[in-house]
Amino acid sequence: LLGMFYQNGHGVMRDYGKAMEWYIKGANSGDDSAMNSIGFMYMQGLGVEKNYDQAEYWYKKAIKINDQCEYYHNRKMAKNLLKNTMM
């Protein structure tokens, strides 16, 4: 939850680096939503260099814990972005 506040600037200054720190803490605790958010951050290049392999890695980790459409959609989107950048 704190990661989302920093990512979106809700009640705090927007800080993608701090958002990523909080997402990683959540992911290390097994929070699938944090894992999904890390994937999104890598896919969009928010606070980190764009990295579609890392995005897919984190989406897959989230899917292993909680297989919901949001995670599937994001993983599929990351794959499509990767294909488009290679063309």
Image (cartoon, helix red, strand yellow):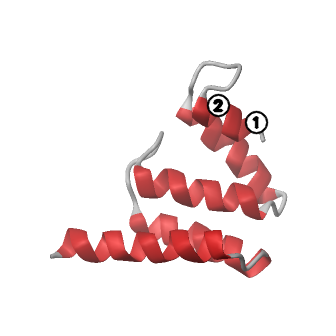
Residue 66 point in image, percent of width and height: 77, 75
The reply to whether dot 1 and dot 2 touch (C-beta < 8 Å) is yes
**Residue that label 1 marks:** 2
Residue at position x 61%, y 43% in the image: 20
Residue 25 point in image, percent of width and height: 76, 48
**Residue that label 2 marks:** 6
Residue 13 point in image, percent of width and height: 60, 19
Give the quadrant of residue 51.
Answer: bottom left
Instruction: Name the quarter where the C terminus is drawn.
Output: bottom left
> 7 or 54, which is in the foreground?
7
Around disc 1, counting alpha carbons within 10 Å, would you say few (fewer than 14), some (14 to 19), or many (20 or more)? some
Instruction: Name the quarter where the N terminus is drawn.
Output: top right
Give the quadrant of residue 67.
Answer: bottom right
Look at label 1 and name its amino acid.
Answer: Leu
**In the figure, 19 relative to 30: above or below?**
above
Q: Relative to residue 31, is residue 4 drawn left or right?
A: left
Residue 47 point in image, percent of width and height: 48, 39
Most distant residue in the left direction: 87
Look at label 2 and name its amino acid.
Answer: Tyr
The dot on residue 35 is none
**In the figure, 3 relative to 79: above or below?**
above
Helix, strand, or loop for circle 1?
Answer: helix
